[in-house]
Every structure is written in C-alpha cells, then in structure tokens.
Amino acid sequence: MLHLPIRQKIIIMLAVMSGMLLAALDQTIVSTALPRIVSELHGLNELSWVVTAYLLTSTIAVPISGKLSDIFGRKRLLLIGILTFVAGSMLSGLSQNMAELIIFRAFQGIGAGVLMSSSFAIIGDLFTPAERGRWQGMIGAVFGLASVIGPLVGGYLTDHATWRWNFYINVPVGIVAFALISRLMPKVEPSHNASIDFLGAGLLAGGLSTLMLGLVWGGNQYAWASTQVIGMLGLAALLLASFIQVERKHAEDPIIPPDLFKNSIFRVSMVIVFLIGIAMFGTLLYIPLFAQGVLGRTATNSGLITTPLVLSLVPASIITGQLVSRTGKYKKLAIFGTFLVSIGMIWLGTLSTSSTNGQLIERMIITGLGLGLSMPIFNLVVQNAFPQSRLGIATASVQLFRSIGATVGVAVMGSIFNNRLANHLASVSHDPANQAVASHVGQNVDIAHLNSNQVQGLLSPQVQHATTTKIASLPPDQQQGILHSYAHFIGSIKEALSSSISEVFIISGVIVSIAFFASWLLREVPLRGHENEPLVSEGGAPGGRPLR
C-alpha cells in the first residue's frame, strides 16, 4: 500500500473518479445522441455496432489490463487508459461516416476497459482493506450519478450544440485527470517479475469477442438457432476451453490465474456478480419501456424515468461503503442487498396496465436500495482475499464477470421478451373485436400480423392522437363504435406489452434470488486494517504472500 498524505490520496482519488465518470457517462450520453448520429451519418443499419464495438473492446480490455497493471504498475496503465479513451473520444467526434465512428468507438472502448480496471485496483494501492469501503461506495455513487446526468447532458449537447460534443466533452476532463495522476501519484514498481502471456491474452480476446458477438446477434440480427449464432458460440467455447487449458498447463504467468478459483470467496463472488449483472442489465432496459408504453409516461430522455432507482442507489452505495469501512463486515450487507434486489424485481413483475406511476416508483426505490447495498461490496471482498501483487487481476475479474453477465442478461432477457410479446400479440391479432379499426391505425400496420416492431409506434402519443383525430372525422354514427374498438385495441396491446415485461422482471428476480442464496455461502474474512496484517487462508489460518 502507498504511504501518502491523506490530502494527496484524496486528490488522486478525485482524479481517478473523474476518469471513471467519463467512462460511466459515455454510454448514457451517447445513447441519447444515437438517433441524431445515424441521421447525420446515414447509418441506421449500423446503429447497434456503435454500442457493440465499445462493449466488445472494453470487456476484452478489462482482464488483460488488470494483469498488465500487476506487472507494470497501476499508474502507467491508468495513464495509458486515459490517453486511449481521450484519443478515441476526439476521433469519434471527428468521424465523417459510420465506419469511422464504429472503429473509433472500439478504440475508445479499449481505453474505457483499461480505465475501469485500473481505477478500482488503485483503491487497493492507496488504502487498507478496512478503508476501501467508503471509496468503493463513492465510485458506486459515480456510476449512479452518471445514469442521471448522462441523458440530461447528452440531450442538451445534442439539441443545443452538436452530437459531436458528446465525445469532445471527454477531452478537457481527461486532460485534467491525466495531469493530476501524472503529477501526484507516485510510481510503484511491481513486487515481482513476470512475463506477458501473449497466447493466453489472444485466446481470451478471441473467446470473449466471439462470445459477445454471439450473444449480441442472437435474437437480433440472427435467430438463436442460426448458423451465425451457433457458429460464434461454438467458436467461443472452443477458444475459451483452449484458454483455460493454456492457463492451467502452459502459461508461466497466466492472464487469469486458475488458482484464483481455488479461493471460495472469489468463486462465490464471481457467481453473485455474474447473476446480478444478468438480472440488473436485463431489467433496467424494460423499466422505461413499461413506463412509456404501458403507463403512458412521456420523457425527453427515457433514461430519466429510472431516476428514482438511481437516487436510491447512490446514497445506499455511499452508506454501504461507510458501514463496511467502520465495521469490517460485509456478509450481512451482501445478503440483505441481494434480498432487496430480488424482492424489488419480483415486485416489479406484479405491475400491470392498471398500475400507477407511484407503484412503479416504489418498486424502483426498493430495487435501487438493494443494488446500492450489494454492488460496492464485491470489489472489496475480492481485494481482501488476495495479496497486493494480485490486486489488479482480482479486481478486473469482478468487472469481467459483471460485464459478461450484463451481456448475457441483455441477450437472454431480450429473447424472452420478444418471444413472449410475439405470443401475446398473436392473440391480439386474432381478436375479431380489433378488426374494426384495421383501416384506421396506419397504412403500415397489419392488425392480423402484429409484431414487436410496431408496438412502440402504435402506443406513442403522437400516433394515438393522429388515429383518434382520423376517427373523429368519420360520420357521427360511426365514431362511437370505432372509438370503442380502438380503445379495446390499444388496451390489448398494452396488456400484451405489460405481461411480457412483467415476465422479464420476475425471471430477473428469480435469478437474483439464486445470488441471494449464494451470498449465504460467502465466507467473511474481517477486512485488514493495516498492510502488514496477514491474509486468512482457506482454512482460516494466516497465509498468502504479504502485501507490499
């Protein structure tokens, strides 16, 4: 651990958090600007790749940069991450076509992955395990804050300047963070000499790339049973199996050491983080859809709808960090946090077309409190289970499993939602009562063959207003019957959408309930308060390499 004046540590952490805010803001800011971007660059067909390219490279960069930070030091990797992210941001803003934007977004994602991995590990370099909780909580608050201000900033810049400023805004903040870290953070030489496992890094990068592509494509660009998706997932399984074999048998200094999984704290934490990632990211996508499509809420930016969840997550995250730092205990908080998340998500699953905004908000608050309690803990838990020399890769593993869980969640929950909605819409299409409005709901809508792509358009306030206006122009003796049929039709679509989203919420809640039961298996090792306190081995006796 670095022995620095507390004032210098705080300034370093403020610089690190500003860098993390950049990476956290990037997704929410850019998502707001995407419609304007594809309109100007004429690339609607490549829209998903603007997000996918960033997601792919950032996920791959996390474990590799975590290992490299253990070899070359955190400061060097963090500065490289900031430079790469800032350069990618500038180039993305200068893009003249979609191909350039996708390439530069991939480059930006590499910087974001390095930035995320190194930032979490730096907390371990600066503070004892007993002190890390409050800073982990603060970083959790940074992510929550980014979720709130990202849509606001992105919408404002897109409307009042240009979408390019959504990328340019990263440059001055990144320069300040780079200068502060470069000047104030001392360079710490690694405690051991190590070689770079190039073969392992290549197999891991290839395996994660094909896995992520298979999951992103499945149910979207291609059917799950298609040759493309099955081929990608099969290739991913082959590459990742080869990676595990190389790491176990041949690598002198593995990218992800297999012996990490011998530690029960690490194993249980990875399972919980993966499951929460599936449920959290698979659920949050559908809260705005429910609020707008079913409850009829309007918002300039759909991200603002989740504000109650985020506003409960942020203070819960900060309080959790303080509690862990003061007590040194984390197991009860992990259990209670996963319990609240599972209850909140299952409770979200009870929403229906008759629900109110208040009922949605109270369910979001419970879910946010649970996420705030549980999210900051597992970086702490894993860091406390290993010596300082393995801090980077142990911390990066948490980010990796969370990211893979998020991708699996988005893909799997998206597939479940689409399948359930298709089934519900089939019954709407076959309802004779809806045929009376067939000629009034738009030329491109075939009521006999409704699909999920038409739902949001049919439920938008503009389309509903235009349809009722069109019906109002009919002879008076026809209006009442057609209006009644139209109300029945819209109600049926809302019911189909509501039921489909509720099923996603319930499945997500069940998945988190598995994480809740797994959290009971989490072995609690009191957080070390000083760098010379030994690690506790699997059997409970002091062991492991001393911290440097």
Image (cartoon, rainbow, N blue to C red):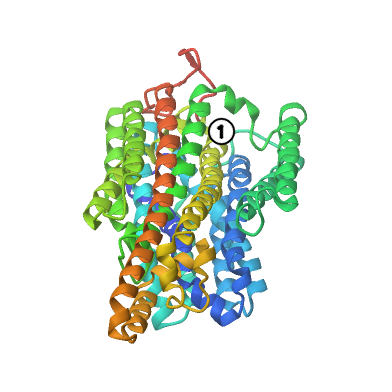
Residue at x 64%, y 55% (from the top left corner): 217
Residue 289 image offset from top left, x and y in percent: 40, 60
Residue visible at 46% across and 33% down?
272
Examine the image and state in which quarter residue 434 appears. Answer: bottom left
- Please count the marks in the image: 1
Residue 305 in the image: above or below residue 279: below
Q: Is residue 35 above or below residue 221?
A: below
Q: Residue 320 appears at what percent x and percent y?
A: 30, 38
Residue 15 appears anywhere in the view: no
Above or below, 232 against 394 in this view is below
| Residue 63 image-quadrant placement | top right
Q: In the structure shown, which secondary structural element does the residue marked by tag 1 occupy?
A: helix
Which percent across, then down, holds residue 26?
Answer: 47, 63
Task: Say left or right for 425 vs 147.
Answer: right
Looking at the rendering, in which quadrant would you find the N terminus?
Answer: top left
Of 311 and 395, the residue lying toward us: 311
The answer to whether residue 428 is seen in the rendering is yes
Q: Is residue 103 left or right of residue 40?
A: right
Q: Farthest residue in the left direction?
A: 358
Q: Residues within 10 Å of mark 1 (few under 14, many from 20)?
A: many
Which residue occupies the foreground of this view, 285 or 104?
A: 285
* Dot 1 amino acid type: Ser
* Between 193 and 479, the one nearer to me in the picture: 479
Residue 72 placement (x, y as % from top left): 62, 44
Say if 454 sits above or below 403 in the image: below
For mark 1, what is the residue? Answer: 389
